[in-house]
């Protein structure tokens, strides 16, 4: 099976909205941002309330939006309805409460992917057994029955 690296993460936002009301955010995969979230969650006992988040979480959420989003689809200007370009200035202008929800959606999507990877990984429970080569098998170079 070919190796399929995860180079960017696609997140539908807001996750609870009907599909016609969602945009798609494309995040770069950043070990630095991921580990910062893991460290923050450890500090706060594994969960952070997004309704009243600590300042460190707000700061990290802003970083996830500004540094982590590399592209988006169906993000439009609130007044004109025109598509907004995914620029650093536009990402930085996103309302903080939206940035917090975007960062939380990013983390949930990573958790989903990690869960899928764990459940699909086949871990052998015993060492592989040698396979017998049938006596009538054609000879291959370097293989002797």
Image: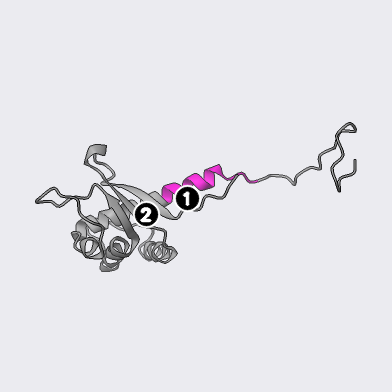
**Is 133 positioned to the left or the right of 7 in the image?**
right
What's the residue at 53%, 43% (across, down)?
A: 119
N-terminal label among 1 and 2: 2
Q: Residue tagged by mark 1?
A: 114
The quadrant in which residue 55 appears is bottom left
> Mark on residue 13?
none
Provide residue 52's location: percent of width, then percent of height: 22, 59
Q: Does the magenta stretch include residue 49?
A: no
Looking at the image, which is closer to me, 121 or 125?
121
Closest to the observer: 89 or 65? 89
Q: Is the residue 38 above or below the residue 83 in the image?
A: below
**Residue plotted at (31% across, 55% down):** 71
- Identify the residue at horizontal 40%, vertical 63% (top origin): 42
Residue at the location (47% across, 50% down)? 114
Report the magenta stretch's main SS. Answer: helix
For the magenta stretch, what is the residue range?
Answer: 111-123
If the image is split into quadrants, where does the N terminus sit? top right
**Badge 2, how many Cα within 10 Å: few under 14, some, many 20+?**
some
Q: Is mark 2 on a helix, strand or loop?
A: helix
Q: For residue 145, which quarter of the picture?
A: top right
Is the image coloured rainbow, by chain, by secondary structure, or in one colour?
one colour
The one of 45 and 143 positioned closer to us in this rendering? 143
- For label 2, the residue is 107
Q: Do callouts 1 and 2 mark residues in contact (Cβ within 8 Å)? A: no
Element at badge 1? Answer: helix
Q: In this view, does 30 lie to the left or right of 140?
A: left
Which is nearer the eye, 130 or 124?
Answer: 130
Vertical placement of 86 versus 113: above or below?
below
Between the C-alphas of marks 1 and 2, the distance is 11 Å
Dot 1 crowding, Cα within 10 Å, few <14, some 14–19, many 20+: few
Question: Quick check: is 115 in the magenta stretch?
Answer: yes
């Amino acid at each position: 099976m070919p190796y399929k690296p995860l180079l960017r993460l696609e997140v539908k936002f807001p996750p609870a909205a009907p599909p016609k009301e969602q945009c798609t955010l494309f995040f770069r995969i950043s070990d630095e941002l991921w580990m910062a979230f893991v460290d923050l969650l450890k500090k706060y006992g594994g969960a952070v309330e997004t309704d009243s988040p600590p300042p460190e979480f707000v700061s990290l959420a802003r970083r996830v939006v500004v540094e982590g989003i590399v592209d988006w689809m169906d993000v439009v200007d609130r007044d004109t309805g025109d598509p907004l370009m995914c620029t650093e200035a536009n990402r930085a202008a996103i309302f903080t409460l939206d940035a917090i929800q975007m960062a939380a959606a990013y983390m949930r999507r990573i958790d989903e992917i990690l869960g899928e990877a764990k459940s699909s990984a086949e871990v052998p429970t015993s060492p592989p057994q040698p396979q017998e080569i049938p006596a009538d098998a054609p000879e291959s170079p370097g293989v002797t029955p």
